[in-house]
Image: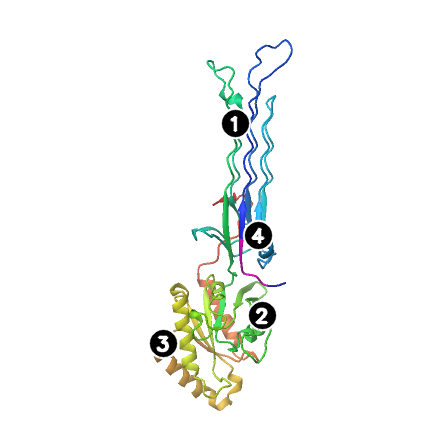
Amino acid sequence: MKFIDEAKIYVKAGDGGNGAATFRREKYIPMGGPNGGDGGRGGSIYAVADRNINTLIDYRYTRKFIGKRGENGGGADQYGAGGDDIVLRMPVGTVIYDQNTEDVIADLARDGEQVLIAKGGRGGLGNLHFKSSTNRAPRKKTDGQPGEEFELRLELRVLADVGLLGLPNAGKSTLIRAISSARPKVADYPFTTLHPNLGVVRVDDEKSFVVADVPGLIEGAADGAGLGIRFLKHLQRTRILLHLVDIAPLDPEADPVHAAAAIVGELAKHDPALAAKPRWLVVNKLDLIPEEERAPTVAAFLAAYRQATGYDGPVFSISAISGDGTKPLIYALYEALAQMTPPAEEPGDDDEPEEA
């Protein structure tokens, strides 16, 4: 299935039905009085988070959702039927924006979370509501109210505990294959990853966390170079970022220090809040360096990198393709995540649907 993480839709809740202005007319019952019923309410539109859906492709081609109108009221105290509600199922992690104001209408961060995004119009009142001691034959009634309508922008942000960050071909996809059951495409050319991939890392039978792999960044990504920064939104829900650095690039003139520092700069340009997240440095591809040269090569890189960026966080040296050094990394990640604020609990059966 094609991965779609953005879509625009139009929603229009149903209008309310009109009230009726009728009178009771039966044999031997003169001046029966008003008996016009109310109109039914219009159908509302809800959004529900569903963990069995992982893409917004359903909303790329079907873009209009219009609720059913409520029925008009009738005589003999007949109330109009309400319009059926529409429920739009979306992936967990979908953020719903008002296209015109850019206000956030809903953030579907938990499976089963339900939010009202367009409320149906109220039905009009029949003339039986307007009778009084001084007005025994009211001819007044009201029309139904229009339903709410919005132009919405849907944006999917994947839910993960750890996000992988780095240049194309830094080994992010290889690492997620090594530590989880995810099988993203791996090749010896840049931009093999074209959409986010999620992998569940199991520390043991009852301990696990989720890792997200996003397409690589290059210098100038904040200005639109390469795939730009459109996929960085998928890292905004993560709690730790792993910055992978290729310590042995194929191009002998490439400078790993400059490349790594450039990624940090692009991150800060795009979103200072994302750049402020805990970020761990992972030096990858040690298998390409002779064993006796690994320690001095990594030490020289770290000294230059720290001088260029002021980095003082954790550092791990690994070979993703062979798995060397990955176990200490995943155990350290789990321990760090366990000490952080846990994600929101799943909604219980007693939770009421939230209204936007």
Whichever of callouts 2 and 4 sits on the residue coming sooner in the sequence is: 4
Instruction: Give me the C-alpha separation between circle 2 and circle 3.
Output: 31 Å
Q: Residues within 10 Å of mark 1 (few under 14, many from 20)?
A: many
Which portion, as a residue range, is magenta?
3-8
In the rendering, at what x and y percent does residue 88 appear? 58, 49
Amino acid at pointer 3: Thr
Amino acid at pointer 4: Arg
Instruction: Give me the C-alpha separation between circle 3 and circle 1.
Output: 68 Å
Residue to which mark 3 is pinned: 309
Instruction: Give me the C-alpha separation between circle 2 and circle 4.
Output: 36 Å
In the rendering, at what x and y percent does residue 347 appear? 53, 49
Q: What is the residue that sits farthest to the front in this orientation?
A: 139
Helix, strand or loop at label 1? It is loop
Q: Residues within 10 Å of mark 3 (few under 14, many from 20)?
A: some
Helix, strand or loop at label 3? It is helix
Whichever of callouts 3 and 4 sits on the residue coming sooner in the sequence is: 4
- Asked whether the residues under the numbered discs 4 and 1 touch, taking CB atoms below 8 Å apart as contact, a structural biologist would say no
Q: Nearer the viewer, mark 3 or mark 1?
A: 1
Residue to which mark 1 is pinned: 125
Residue to which mark 2 is pinned: 180
Q: Residues within 10 Å of mark 4 (few under 14, many from 20)?
A: some
Horizontal side of residue 334 vs 62, given as left or right? left
Residue to which mark 4 is pinned: 63
Whichever of callouts 4 and 1 sits on the residue coming sooner in the sequence is: 4
Q: Quadrant of residue 29?
A: top right
Q: Where 330 sits versus 100, above or below?
A: below
| Of 253 and 288, the residue lying toward us | 253
